Amino acid sequence: MVRRMSTTETIVAVATPAGRSALAVLRVDGPLAAEIARAACGRATPPTAKRATVAVWRDVAGDPIDQVVVVLSRAPSSFTGGDSLEITCHGNPLLARRLAEDCLARGCRAAEPGEFTRRAFLAGKLDLTQAEAVADLIHASSERALASARRQLAGELGRQVAAWSDRLLAALAHLEAHIDFPEEDLPAEDPTGPLRTLAGIESELSGYARTARHDATLRAGLRVAVVGAPNAGKSSLLNALTGTARALVSAEAGTTRDFLEAPVAGLPLAVTAVDTAGLRDAGSALERAGMERSLEQARAAHFLLLVVDRSAPPPTLPPELDGLLAADRTLVIENKTDLPAHPAHASWRTDLVKIPTCLLDGRDAEALRARLGEILVARDVAPGAEDLVVGVRHADALLRAAGSLKQAQDHLRPPAATELAAVRCREALDALGEIVGRIDNERMLDKLFASFCIGK
Ligand SMILES: Nc1nc2c(ncn2[C@@H]2O[C@H](COP(=O)(O)OP(=O)(O)OP(=O)(O)O)[C@@H](O)[C@H]2O)c(=O)[nH]1
Ligand SMILES: [Mg+2]
């Protein structure tokens, strides 16, 4: 943030999108909130904390702006920790703007992006991971992304970080005792315990950091390209997956010339299916141009669905596609199971998983979509419902912490340099602290004194 944001200022923002709607909401936060409400709503209807009050909001000149519902929350029991006012007005952007302008005239300043949540963080209402989750919750575009943001907002990652920090502090306390009181009658130092603890935490941190590979998937979704020979049923598959008649289907080979995309229906993940022009190892100039685009889509996709007509001999595909058909990111859709199977399919591409379907009507569509969802998770292309996915910022800090712990372990092995190991452990604690937004030396000291009786 560029400018200093003091919580002694009262800020205002329209919290709902611009445009006409049934209602619009404004937020005011800071020490002037209660007084502004009292002044604008009139002495007859002074808002009571945590009660919805219906009132006519009058501007500084005393002219009515709108009939509103105001809710006042008093410090510290508000989202931000300060005095907060929520104003619900009729959903006309002109009204919302006039209300905001009136608040500015009454001493507020316009809020910066995310400033309410930032205040909540500064007031200790949320840790940094929870503050980040507020934004994720708002931007989530699939059920799984919502679930992930909800878990983080509930503090799951923060609690996990606290648990790692606690274990690390206990190990550090053990090391510090040997550093501070080497001449006392402490038992001879045995590095196996702390080594094991540090190795355990290190591997957990690295494991969690790896889940960040799904972060982009939760944010932007996945692209699944539908590829195969002409007339195999690719467009029929796109329609089945999306539950639409988006793509033109016809018995003529070469129907689809350009690619087209649409969201797959009914999955907890945001998946876009891309229909492409048929691929074969020949063709006119126009067909080749279409095929080049198909290959581009296949290269850019996270996953491939290779549609084959099982009633015909197995296709001869261009070598460029062959190179893209990796077993872990390809599924063969063996189509036209209503027709007799061509015998050569049994021995064709046995390295790839095949799902038989009939795409003449919608009968297999729902099962196919569900199966695709399962396979994306099973192949680790997408996160499962149980997976906690950390963000890139978290992963960076986790990896730095893991790196420090690795060095700490090296220092503990003979010839041991316990001081250096302790320094690395504190470095790891600091990195973990960054995840939740604090560096808790205070807690470290508490822990140290609690687990060792110094005066004994
Ligand atoms: N018998 C049978 N015909 C099918 C099946 N699925 C699709 N078809 C037919 O196969 C023909 C081609 O289907 P499309 O979905 O257009 O195939 P495509 O792969 O998109 O073809 P191009 O765009 O030309 O490359 C159409 O006549 C479909 O009705 C099936 O399961 N069984
Ligand atoms: Mg087609």
Image (spheres, helix red, strand yellow):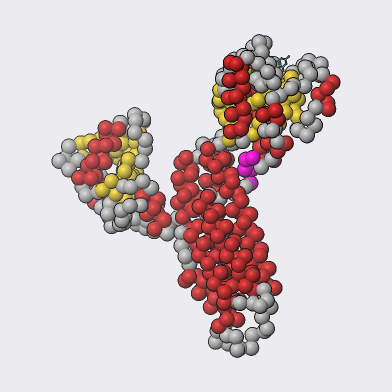
Horizontally, residue 263 falls left or right of residue 349, namely left
Furthest-left residue in view? 61
Instruction: Please say whether residue 408 is one of the residues in the magenta stretch.
Output: no
Of residues 66 and 217, the one drawn nearer to the viewer in this rendering: 217
Q: Position of residue 101 (x, y in %)?
A: 23, 41
Q: Is residue 272 visible?
A: yes
Instruction: Give the extent of the magenta segment.
Output: 381-386
Q: Position of residue 86 (x, y in %)?
A: 33, 44
Q: Quadrant of residue 311?
A: top right
Horizontally, residue 425 falls left or right of residue 372, namely left
Kindly identify the residue that appears in the image at 20 percent across and 36 percent down.
64
Kindly identify the residue that appears in the image at 31 percent across and 43 percent down.
13
Q: Compared with residue 54, is residue 117 higher up or lower down, i.e. above or below? A: below
In the rendered image, which quarter contains the C terminus? bottom right
Q: Quadrant of residue 347?
A: top right
Q: Position of residue 237 (x, y in %)?
A: 65, 22
Q: Quadrant of residue 455?
A: bottom right
Q: Position of residue 163 (x, y in %)?
A: 58, 62
Instruction: Please say whether residue 384 is one of the residues in the magenta stretch.
Output: yes
Count numbered badges in the picture.
0
Ligand 1, by image quadrant, is top right
Of residues 88 and 42, the one drawn nearer to the viewer in this rendering: 88
Kindly identify the residue that appears in the image at 45 percent across and 51 percent down.
131
Kindly identify the residue that appears in the image at 41 percent across and 56 percent down.
121
Q: Compared with residue 180, is residue 41 higher up or lower down, i.e. above or below? A: above
Q: Main secondary structure of the magenta part?
A: loop
Q: Compared with residue 132, is residue 421 higher up or lower down, i.e. above or below? A: below
